[in-house]
Image (cartoon, rainbow, N blue to C red):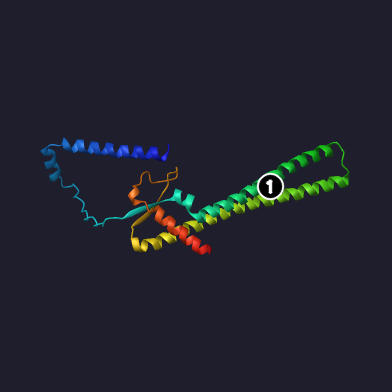
Amino acid sequence: MNNKFSTFINIGLVIAVAVLYYLHFSNCNKGCSANESNDSTAASAPMVMAPKEIKATKIVYVNSDILNEKYEYVKELASTAQAKQQRLEMAYQSKGQKLQQDYAEFQQKASQGLLSENQMNASQDDLRKRKEELDQMEAQLQRLVEEIQADNNRVRKTVVDYVKEYNKQSQYNYVLTYSDGPGGVILLANDSMDITNEILDGLNAQYRAQKK
């Protein structure tokens, strides 16, 4: 059972309990009230503190999909990472396929007794070195994943730091992120609260200045 379905069930249970509670006390007659008041064991009503006064909250949001698409810093990082990944993956696949072919050919010749002892040793050394090269390329791909994660963290920090400076004048209580994708937690956002373009323009201007 997924979380959404569980939430709907819990809401249904709360509503059901509320209905039963209402029916019970609406059918209770005056005698019921008198008996309750005379019951020496009845608990006194709990003291409820007055709710804290909350000032009007100012909330805006930034569309993270647009930032990912148009923030120049993100575009440059993504382009560089994608080029590295494609280059490594193509080289890895090519070398891996060639190694498999040569290894199969080596096994076939060895089983047929077509290789001398020196040829056997030389072929095994060559295959082992090439396998080590593939292992190193796998490690490079893993490091690339870690680099991408580090880049993502830097981008997030850059955006958060800029929003903090931006908010010194705006004084918003919350600046949320909004995404149309399946990972988004906000289902609906009013366009009047969208400050994406202002944040995007500021971030790009800041990035261009830093590059110079």
Local crowd at mark 1 within 10 Å, few (<14), some, or many (≥20)? few
Q: Residue furthest right?
A: 116
Q: Residue at x 54, y 54 (%)?
A: 76
Q: Residue at x 32, y 39 (%)?
A: 11
Q: Residue at x 49, y 57 (%)?
A: 155
Question: What kind of element bears circle 1?
Answer: helix
- In x, y percent, where is residue 59? 33, 54
Q: Is residue 12 left or right of residue 89?
A: left
Q: How many marks?
A: 1
Q: Residue at x 68, y 52 (%)?
A: 136
- In x, y percent, where is residue 42? 18, 46
- In x, y percent, where is residue 71? 48, 54
Q: Nearer the viewer, residue 148 or 3?
A: 148
Quadrant, the N terminus: top left
Amino acid type, mark 1: Ala
Q: Which residue is mark 1?
A: 91
Q: Is residue 34 left or right of residue 114?
A: left
Residue 181 lies, with reference to residue 57, above or below; the image says above
- In x, y percent, where is residue 87? 65, 49
Q: Is residue 132 left or right of residue 10?
A: right
Q: Nearer the viewer, residue 19 or 85?
A: 85
